[in-house]
Amino acid sequence: MTLDVNVASVMDIIGRNGPDHLLPLSDDPAEVRRSLVTLRAKHPAEIFRGDGVDTTDVTLPSGLDLRFYAVEGEHDRPVALYLHGGGWVCGSLDDFDKFCRTLAARSHMVVVSVAYRLAPEFPFPAALDDLSEAYSWVQEHGEEYGADPKTVVVMGSSAGGNIAAAFAASRSGDPQTPIALQVLLYPSLDSSLACSSVAENASGYYLTRKQLQWYWTQYVPDPGKLRDPLASPTYRRSLVGLPPAIVVTAEHDPLHDEGSDYAARLAADGVPVHHFDFRGQIHGFLALIGIVPGVEDSINILADTISASLHVKR
């Protein structure tokens, strides 16, 4: 299969190897973060207001920031805790605002974007601890924002998918705080980077093997912890009893195979799974709203599947 022509056009503008030019020159995360902001500015998205979606920013006593997205006037809706991508090093609430607005509008869930602490300043397991804090807080206060805290989805993109998968596995079998669904969008799950797709898509599709190696060393600086299942979920021996899952992969993504393999393992261990493998697409394509035609259609498919899995009436 060939690369989607619209995605190829965008990559020609922002550069097919993302911020690779920085990594040999600097190990400064702040510089890499600035580079990514510059790359995004080369092809800004159209402003998307979210079809009647209200937002509320909340800062927890610890300093953790959350952003709630809810369709105006709706109450008792399932709540999705969303963890953004960015290699555990980059990313912010604003970077993924359009995606969260679109998802809330299409799915009629309350979406809660979690501004987890970033590596290397806060390495593993800080992000997991932040998700745990956000989860507990939503359990207690979610109703104030239109959410039904009895129906909680954990959801993440890329590095955020790693955090969501690890958290879902860590909470499996807990009857007091059950997770209704885990949604893993092109997740980073295997610290070894040994899957074939890492080699096949090592460069030329924006996310590169070089970046992946650097991101992992920032998130898990202790080599002895790289195969801890909470850091690298693919090393969990059994997936029996984990929450139902939706897994999204992209054809031209170094992380394609680890996501596909994890979906297959979930299914083999008896976990209900919907696996969507988008052909012609690259890592992170769902964030290209207003840039690449058809992305909103893909989000609609995701929203429809989430709603059907949770038996949500829209």
Image (cartoon, rainbow, N blue to C red):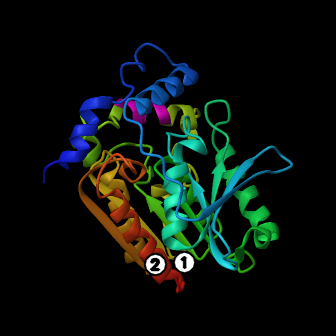
Examine the rendered structure and indicate whether residue 144 appears above or below residue 20: below
By secondary structure, the bulk of the magenta-drawn segment is best described as helix
Examine the rendered structure and indicate whether residue 279 appears above or below residue 72: above
**What percent of the width, then of the height, locates residue 74?**
66, 76
Q: Residue furthest right?
A: 61
Amino acid bearing label 2 = Val
Part of the protein shown in magenta: 210-215
Amino acid bearing label 1 = Gly
Q: Is residue 213 left or right of residue 205?
A: right
- How many numbered discs sit on the rendered protein? 2
How busy is the neighbourhood of tag 2: few (under 14 within 10 Å), some, or many (20 plus)?
A: some
Identify the image quadrant of residue 20: top left
Identify the image quadrant of residue 305: bottom left
Name which residue lies at 45% across and 71% down. Answer: 303
How busy is the neighbourhood of tag 1: few (under 14 within 10 Å), some, or many (20 plus)?
A: few
Name which residue lies at 35% across and 37% down. Answer: 207
Name which residue lies at 59% across and 71% down. Answer: 109
Residue at label 2? 271
Viewer can see residue 203: no
Viewer can see residue 75: yes
Task: Assess whether residue 227 is covered by the magenta stretch.
Answer: no
Residue at label 1? 241
Rounded to the nearest whole Å, what is the CA distance between mark 2 and mark 1? Answer: 7 Å
Q: Is residue 153 left or right of residue 282?
A: right
Name which residue lies at 40% across and 64% down. Answer: 299
Q: Quadrant of the N terminus?
A: bottom left
**What percent of the width, then of the height, locates residue 32?**
50, 24
Q: Earlier in the sequence, mark 2 or mark 1?
A: 1
Is label 2 in a helix, a strand or a loop? loop
**What percent of the width, then of the height, locates residue 44?**
41, 37
**What percent of the width, then of the height, locates residue 169?**
58, 65
